[in-house]
Amino acid sequence: MADRTILDMFSLDGRVAIVTGASSGLGAVFARTLAEAGADVALGARRVDRLADTRQAVEKAGRRAIAVRTDVAVPEDCQALVDATMAEFGRVDVLVNNAGIGTAVPATRETPEQFRSVIDVNLNGCYWMAQACGRVMQPGSSIVNISSILGLTTAGLPQAAYAASKAGLIGLTRDLAQQWTGRRGIRVNALAPGFFTSEMTDAYAEGYLESQMPRVLAGRKGDPEELAAALIFLASDAGGYVTGVTLPVEGGMLTS
């Protein structure tokens, strides 16, 4: 529309988003920010009891929310989350594939179970969610996969499973964009965050983050709101001509 302003392009009014891993950390920030942009939000997490605060934040922003216990490593759970969203809201416009886990186990000691569990959640789970959403999404919809800077570089920790899963997610993003954007009008992109405060970074050894800061041109950890702003760009009409890309949000770490 000719009278639409640039800020109108970032609006998600009337749309419905699904956020996995929404019980805490970046997932909770994503859910609240999507609501502030105008979307109703379906919240998925394994710890469904911890979704209450996120749901309250969405409702405080004036939007509706539902909470559904979801283990994305289980395809049936992914389908159930999408089914519940369709039953409550009648549509799915945005999927934020945020659920993820991490390990830091030396490669010679990592067990098959440890490796598989990370791949199952971080990569396979994103695929199951994208499949379920792709079946019901209409043209103009958007999928945003939360990859990691560790899918593109290393950062001094033994993270073979995590790095492999996040690099795989970048490949999955490209392929789904190739399959769905032209034929179905569904854009598929990824974010590659650098160091942002989350449950995962809370588990790092003391001094680790500080040791990595010389690699970051900005000289600091990211503010979750800065990552959420990039998410809104990719999810909204503002990113309508962007698909199949991985957007690093990492303060310049890739230049080192």
Image (cartoon, rainbow, N blue to C red):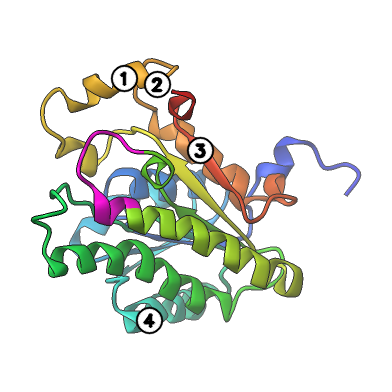
Give me the C-alpha separation between circle 1 and circle 2: 5 Å
Residue linked to disc 1: 213
Secondary structure category for the residue under label 1: helix
Residues tagged 1 and 2 counted as in contact (Cβ below 8 A): yes
Give me the C-alpha separation between circle 3 and circle 4: 31 Å
Residue linked to disc 4: 80
Residue linked to disc 3: 248
Secondary structure category for the residue under label 2: loop
**Which numbered disc flags the more N-terminal residue, 4 or 2?**
4
In the picture, measured across the screen, residue 42 lies left or right of residue 178, that is left
Instruction: Name which residue lies at 29% across and 34% down.
Output: 155
Of circles 3 and 4, the one toward us is 3
Give me the C-alpha separation between circle 3 and circle 1: 16 Å
Please provide the residue range marked out in magenta. 154-163
Residues tagged 2 and 3 counted as in contact (Cβ below 8 A): no
**Which numbered disc flags the more N-terminal residue, 1 or 4?**
4
Give me the C-alpha separation between circle 4 and circle 2: 40 Å
